[in-house]
Image: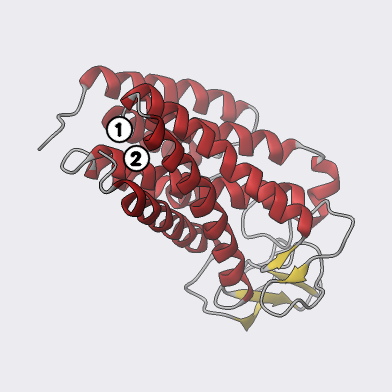
């Protein structure tokens, strides 16, 4: 084991996660199971990875939670289409931070800079997707399906807008800047910081678009015969069992988010490996 866990970091990560989770729960950004997810992910990423890793998680959670409240009344009507509401649960926490947690654990055994860059790519992907969703649905132009460009209703899985893509790019860049700052302070190497920034932006953007691609093709999508609405939920918000329309039932929104973060991590790690070897 190259890097032993730091008990002060573990305790600090738990305390910080508990404080953030408590505020988020009171503001209804987390469900009860989501609090557990926040405690688990925060403790692992901060405790095993260090403050640089924890900063990525905090940046994602705080920014995405704030954006979910942005013009919330206008977005309320779209809730029936999405599998989850704005209150994140345990499944969402693990889907968004699961790759980062696994990489933080792996950093105890393998070179940390490369894995940190991969973690930044994973968090950039889920952040880009969340930003794109929260703001993209407010676009004045109708979304188009990412596979064939066909116009679809707002909130349709796999639908993208120019605004959403641009905001998603900004979301990836936001995490990339946090990651570059952490890399610079940790290594004092400008090339490492720049490559991690580039890897985060590219990996995050690719991962977000991959999320949309899965949403348009393989993700399980259903139709509520009672409300006559398309939804990601097998049981619609009205309580009616929805009928499968396309995709695979086992591929739900949480798994799609997780897979997009895997893609973001792989792209970022590939860029880092290509330009700087093992980044260390």
Rendered image quadrant of residue 97? top left
Number of residues whose C-alpha sits closer than 10 Å to that of mark 2, classed few (under 14), some (14–19) or many (20 or more): many
Residue where numbered disc 1 is placed: 49
Mark 1: which secondary structure? helix
Residue 77: x, y in percent?
82, 54
Q: Residue furthest left?
A: 1
The residue at 39%/19% (across/down) is 15
Residue drawn at the location 54% of the way across and 59% of the way down: 206
Quadrant position of the N terminus in the picture: top left
- Mark-to-mark CA distance, 2 and 1: 8 Å
Name the foreground residue: 250 vs 127.
127
- Residue 102 image point, x, y percent: 30, 47
In-image side of 168 versus 102 (left or right): right
What SS does tag 2 mark? Answer: helix
Count the numbered circles shown: 2
Label 2 with label 1: CB-CB less than 8 Å: yes
Q: Is residue 214 visible?
A: yes
Q: Nearer the viewer, residue 150 or 239?
A: 150
Which residue is at a point 45% across and 37% down the rendered structure image? 194
Q: Residue furthest right?
A: 140
Tell me where residue 23 appears, x and y as whole percent. 57, 23
**Numbered circle sitting on residue 116:** 2
Q: Is residue 90 visible?
A: no
Label ID, residue 140: none
Front residue (pair 159, 41): 159
């Amino acid at each position: 084991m190259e890097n032993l866990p730091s008990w002060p970091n573990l305790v600090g990560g738990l305390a910080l996660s508990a404080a953030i989770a408590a505020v988020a729960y009171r503001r209804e950004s987390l469900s009860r199971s989501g609090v557990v997810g926040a405690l688990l992910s925060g403790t692992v990423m901060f405790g095993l990875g260090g403050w640089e890793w924890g900063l990525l998680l905090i940046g994602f959670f705080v920014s995405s939670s704030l954006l979910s409240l942005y013009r919330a009344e206008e977005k309320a009507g779209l809730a029936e289409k999405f599998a989850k509401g704005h209150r994140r649960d345990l499944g969402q926490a693990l889907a968004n931070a699961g790759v980062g947690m696994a990489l933080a654990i792996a950093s105890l055994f393998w070179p940390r800079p490369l894995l940190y860059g991969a973690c930044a790519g994973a968090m950039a992907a889920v952040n880009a997707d969340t930003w794109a969703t929260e703001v993209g649905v407010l676009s004045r132009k109708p979304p188009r399906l990412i596979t064939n460009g066909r116009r679809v209703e707002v909130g349709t899985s796999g639908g993208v807008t120019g605004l959403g893509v641009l905001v998603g790019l900004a979301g990836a860049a936001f995490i990339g800047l946090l990651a570059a700052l952490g890399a610079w302070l940790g290594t004092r190497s400008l090339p490492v910081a720049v490559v991690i920034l580039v890897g985060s932006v590219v990996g995050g953007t690719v991962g977000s678009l991959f999320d949309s691609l899965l949403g348009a093709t393989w993700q399980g999508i259903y139709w509520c015969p009672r409300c006559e609405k398309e939804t990601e939920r097998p049981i619609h918000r009205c309580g009616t069992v929805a009928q499968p329309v396309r995709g695979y039932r086992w591929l739900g929104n949480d798994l799609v988010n997780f897979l997009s973060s895997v893609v973001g991590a792989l792209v970022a790690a590939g860029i880092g490996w290509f330009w700087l070897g093992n980044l260390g």
